[in-house]
Amino acid sequence: MILILVPNTLPESSEYKQLMAYLANLPGITTRVHTEVGAEKTLTELYLIGNTKSLSTDEISNLPCVDRVVRVSEEYRVLGRHQNDTRSTSFEYNGVTFGQDTLNVFAGLCAVDTLEHVELMMKVLQQEGQTCTRMGAYKPRTSPYSFQGHGSTCLPYVFDLAGKYDIKVIAMEITHEVHLEEIRTALHQTGSPTGVMLQIGTRNTQNFELLKIVGRQQTFPVLIKRGFGITLDESLNAAEYLASEGNRKVIFGLRGMKTNMGDPHRNFVDFSHVPVVKRLTRMPVCIDPSHSVGTRAASPDGTLDIMHATAQGVIAGANMVLVDFHPVPNKALVDGPQALLIKELPHYLEDVRIAREAYLKRVELARRFNT
Ligand code: PEP
Ligand code: MN
């Protein structure tokens, strides 16, 4: 059971103390406090853990400071969408809003290779009015002999260039807790010219110890990718690990499933699950058409499969798109064959705009027919 308190409730107030004393006396129930400090108001939620079935919602609603009571299902307690649950589905980070109603495109390099390529990419993003990108520094590779990413050595120039080109958020995968510290240090040393969204890749979706560490910090939002060989439920529970440790700035990423049934694409595209994740949870949903499709193949209509897959996700309500671009794909050290060309960015963004507009029209249509 979640008790949502009246905004700006002070822990020093006598009403709050009265409420806590009441809850402390409930047998077999422990209380966990979560506070979200916003620009205008502070929201406090109390999680009652234990046998809450016997508690009366009405009685709890009438306790001092309590605004609303949400009875949670067992699944995805923090991130889940529960009955009568009107809690927010969005958050802000470094001036960018991420929610179930917004859309942000993160076009960029799968892996940082040279400073020049990072700069070429960011320059064109700025020209196209984009404020987010993807830049991989730590790459989990199938072969130990493949390029593993430049790691912390590239961070200072990536962050400096992001500041120069007004990039607000960089999605960056981490595979070890040390990387979190390296990112923190590099941001500090460069004067925090940009923000970072930590990415948990599909190979680490169930790396529970990493999830707990990333979940314990609330500085950086997290994009967690769906595990490519596990059920959706297992992946959503992995996301819940982050939230249960305190970080609710979590975005869920669909990136295709590993099965030969998806051939000739690299993975089987699973973007029909965009609305499913939005129904089951309050997380914004990201799609990664590059790692799911994995090729620059085009259909006879002249549109790349990656663009078709992007449109499928966006028209179904995706909130974030993570997509590989590269100035010289044949020189890319990772995933060159699936990278779009810089000159294709305007085409790509216009295609995304068309799909988004269609999605918004479809929402309006549903509203009209449902009322
Ligand atoms: C990536 O986004 O660079 C990546 C490795 O993705 P995934 O974890 O989905 O394979
Ligand atoms: Mn990649």
Image (tube, grey):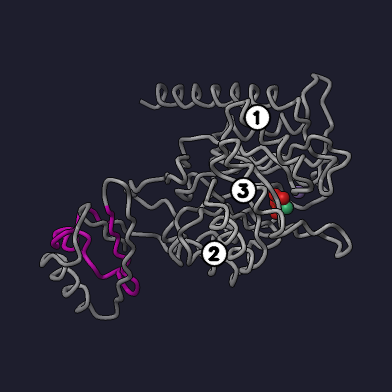
Q: Residue at x 78, y 46 (%)?
A: 114
Q: Secondary structure at mark 1?
A: helix
Highlighted range, magenta: 42-69
Earlier residue among tags 3 and 1: 3
Q: Amino acid at mark 1?
A: Ala
For the residue pair 361 and 65, the one nearer the viewer reads as 65
For the residue pair 308 and 10, the one nearer the viewer reads as 10
Q: Amino acid at mark 3?
A: Phe
The answer to whether 43 is drawn above or below residue 288 in the figure is below
The answer to whether the residue labelled 3 contacts the one labelled 1, judged by CB atoms less than 8 Å apart, is no
Q: Residue at x 60, y 21 (%)?
A: 354
Residue underneath mark 1: 311
Q: Amino acid at mark 2?
A: Val
Alpha-carbon span between mark 2 and mark 1: 31 Å
Q: Secondary structure at mark 2?
A: helix
| Left or right position of 137 against 171 | right
Q: Say which quadrant the N terminus sits in.
A: bottom left
Instruction: Inspect the magenta stretch and tell me whether residue 279 lies in it.
Output: no
Earlier residue among tags 2 and 1: 2
Q: Say which quadrant the C terminus sits in.
A: top left
What numbered label is drawn on residue 22? none
Residue underneath mark 3: 159
Residue underneath mark 2: 214
For the residue pair 19 and 361, the one nearer the viewer reads as 19
Q: Secondary structure at mark 3?
A: helix
Spot occupied by residue 220 in the image (x, y as percentages of width and height): 51, 55
Mark 2 vs mark 3, foreground winner is 3
Q: Residues within 10 Å of mark 3 (few under 14, many from 20)?
A: many
Alpha-carbon span between mark 2 and mark 3: 20 Å
For the residue pair 291 and 258, the one nearer the viewer reads as 291
The answer to whether the residue labelled 2 contacts the one labelled 3, judged by CB atoms less than 8 Å apart, is no
